[in-house]
Amino acid sequence: MVHLGTSPGSRKAVDIGRTASALLVYQDDTRARSVSLHRSAELVRTPEARRQWFMPAWRAFWPHGPDDDDFVVIHYAPHTGGVGGPAVHHSVAVRGAVWRRRH
């Protein structure tokens, strides 16, 4: 599962509300690697979820923290994905998570 924050009026929030899905991409430019994940997605507005998934660095965007009226959580559920990059690279690590290319 991946959880991110957004504004309920953002284009991505409107698209998720319309399609219930999203393409999430992590890219490592220095090593020419990427991971793309097609996922089911939903906006979660409960106070409990907003407090659980709010990241302190996000206060730059939502000064009132998880209780900011302009903050909702995007909940991404696993679906399909792929690892990209030069043939010699078989995995990508992003903040402790590792995705590996299947052979």
Image: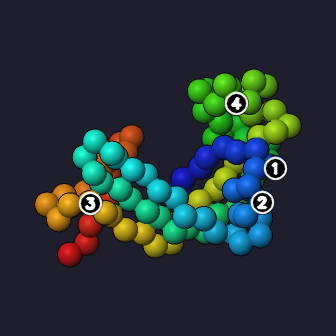
Q: Secondary structure at mark 1?
A: loop
Q: Residue, x 82% and y 39% (percent of image)?
A: 70
- Give the number of marks: 4
Amino acid type, residue under disc 1 in the picture: Gly
Q: Which residue is mark 4?
A: 61
In primary-sequence order, the first of circles 2 and 4 is: 2
The reply to whether residue 10 is visible in this rendering is yes
Amino acid type, residue under disc 3 in the picture: Gly
Q: In terms of depth relative to the viewer, which is nearer, 82 or 53?
A: 82
The quadrant holding residue 75 is bottom right
Give left or right: position of 11 versus 102: right
Residue 85, numbered circle: 3
Residue 9, numbered circle: 1
Expressed as whole percent of the image width and height from the top left, the position of residue 69 reads 85, 37
Q: Which residue is mark 2?
A: 14
Q: Residue, x 73% and y 64% (percent of image)?
A: 15
